[in-house]
Amino acid sequence: MSIAIDGVAIPEAAIAREVQHHPAAKLEDARAAAARALVVRQLLLRRAAALGIGAADPAAADGEEEVIAELLAREVTVPAADAETCARYWRNNRQRFRSPDLVEARHILIAAAPDDDDGRAEAKRKAEALIAELRREPGAFGALAQQFSACPSKEQGGHLGQLVRGQTVPELDTFLFNLDPGLCPVPLSTRYGYHVLSVEQKVLGRELPYDAVKDRIADYLQDRSWRTAVSQYIRILAGGATIDGIDLGAATSPLVQ
């Protein structure tokens, strides 16, 4: 079905070009998102043209992004978040404003490919043997890492340094931040093989004081208010037009890429 605004079609070629900016699991979902974005853009550009925003000569027109930005600056305004609003948001969302948890760890990687069942079974046996040896001789971790680990960290005795969440693969990350300090009693499986893991130290994040985050909160609340106002503004523009072939739904944002 063709997409049109007041009878003026959005070219299929334009939708095809826009698709690249809207990755999705299914092509039809990406196409729908691209079409919505182009409809929103045209609504904004038509309003800008009605107000005389942009160059009078279409051949020398300002870039569309600049025109849209000028339009929104003129027609969409929101008040700055006041101090009490920011303080209230902080009081109600303190857990969002913490310094990150830190973990210092080291490991020995016994490498095995994800699809090599025999190799993974052997890697697990080797990792279990290393854990047993480390229980007898905890001070041997560095030497064993140097001898057996397939990770470049072996040159530092297996040390991974200080880590925050998300710095390692998810399957290892989960254990890092839930284990108590010490040697993990079982090998940990990841896409790379099996890991002998030792948590050396954990430092839990702390709640940040209001003064440290108030500017961040003010920026966040301002941006949230602006996006809400822009969404409402686009709905007003859409209500004054006949749009065929697409339902704008919640995709009423000028931020199309």
Image (cartoon, rainbow, N blue to C red):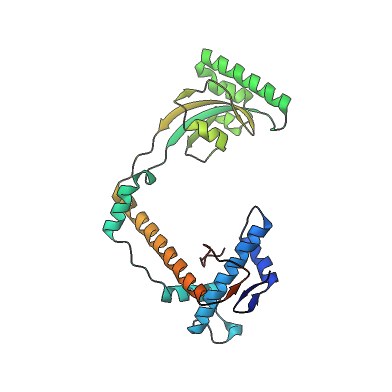
The answer to which quarter of the image holds residue 18 is bottom right
| Residue drawn at 56 percent across, 65 percent down | 256
The number of discs equals 0
Query: Closest to the observer: 244 or 176?
Result: 244
**Residue 191, horizontal then vertical, whole percent:** 64, 34
Residue 185 left/right relative to 25: left
Q: Quadrant of the N terminus?
A: bottom right
Residue 94 left/right relative to 47: left
| Residue drawn at 62 percent across, 67 percent down | 35
Residue 256 left/right relative to 228: right
Query: Closest to the observer: 154 or 50?
Result: 50
Q: Residue furthest left?
A: 84
Query: Closest to the observer: 20 or 60?
Result: 20
**Residue 188, horizontal then vertical, whole percent:** 58, 27
Q: Residue furthest top?
A: 136
**Residue 209, horizontal then vertical, whole percent:** 30, 46
Residue 112 left/right relative to 185: right
| Residue drawn at 63 percent across, 79 percent down | 8
| Residue drawn at 48 percent across, 70 percent down | 235
In the picture shown, does residue 25 fall above or below 107? below
**Residue 45, horizontal then vertical, whole percent:** 54, 77
Q: Quadrant of the C terminus?
A: bottom right
Query: Closest to the observer: 144 or 43?
Result: 43
